[in-house]
Image (tube, rainbow, N blue to C red):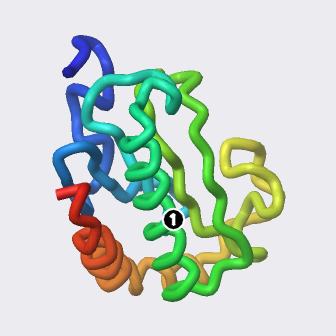
Amino acid sequence: MKRAGCALCETEGGLAVFRADKFRVIRAEESGFPAFYRLIWNDHVAEFSDLSAADRLLCMEAVTLIETVLRRQLQPTKVNLATLGNVVPHLHWHVIARFDWDSHFPAPVWGAALRPDDEAALARVRRQLPVLDGDIQAALATMPAAL
């Protein structure tokens, strides 16, 4: 079920990486954070508790698989997981690889920058994105309930 006026119902929400019946994964194009992914529930629901128990398990398994790929491929300092929905009240999870060199670390990506962007480090991560996207697709494709 879609809701008129909802940005995540009316648009893909970013660069498409994976699509299943119940959810999709996009790469957000957030300046300074190239490995910033979102799992977006396809039906319009506002809260995680709106999902059935089975769908909550499916959703968290998918989030876990994305995090696992980010950790394996990028070896980030930390992976941030968040589901806020204050601005866009449509269930979506942020899965963000964070590095001690990023402009905001250890503060949240939505806060003020603590230092300038490390352009060389960002370029190294950006070069890995096509492979990273493919590895996320492959990992999520192993989830029979998602297809």
64 or 93, which lies in front?
Answer: 64
110 or 147, which lies in front?
Answer: 147
Residue drawn 28% across and 66% down? Answer: 143
Residue labelled with disc 1: 64
- Where residue 22 sits in the image (x, y, percent)? 24, 43
Q: Residues within 10 Å of mark 1 (few under 14, many from 20)?
A: some
Q: Quadrant of residue 44?
A: top left
- Where residue 116 sits in the image (x, y, percent)? 73, 65
- Residue 128, relative to residue 144: is it above or below? below
Please identify the residue farthest to the front as the structure is shown.
Answer: 53
Task: Assign the N terminus to one quadrant of the image.
Answer: top left
Question: Could you tell whether 113 is left or right of 133 in the image?
Answer: right
Please identify the residue farthest to the top as the structure is shown.
Answer: 4
Question: Could you tell whether 31 is left or right of 135 in the image?
Answer: right
Q: Quadrant of residue 127?
A: bottom left
Residue drawn 50% across and 45% down? Answer: 93
102 or 46, which lies in front?
Answer: 46
- Where residue 137 sits in the image (x, y, percent)? 26, 72
- Residue 113, relative to residue 4: is it above or below? below
Q: Quadrant of residue 27?
A: bottom left
Specify the amino acid type for callout 1: Thr
Secondary structure, mark 1, is: helix
Looking at the rendered structure, the number of numbered marks drawn on it comes to 1
Residue drawn 23% across and 41% down? Answer: 12
- Where residue 75 sits in the image (x, y, percent)? 62, 86
Question: Could you tell whether 138 is left or right of 85 in the image?
Answer: left
Task: Assign the C terminus to one quadrant of the image.
Answer: bottom left
Residue drawn 74% across and 50% down? Answer: 108
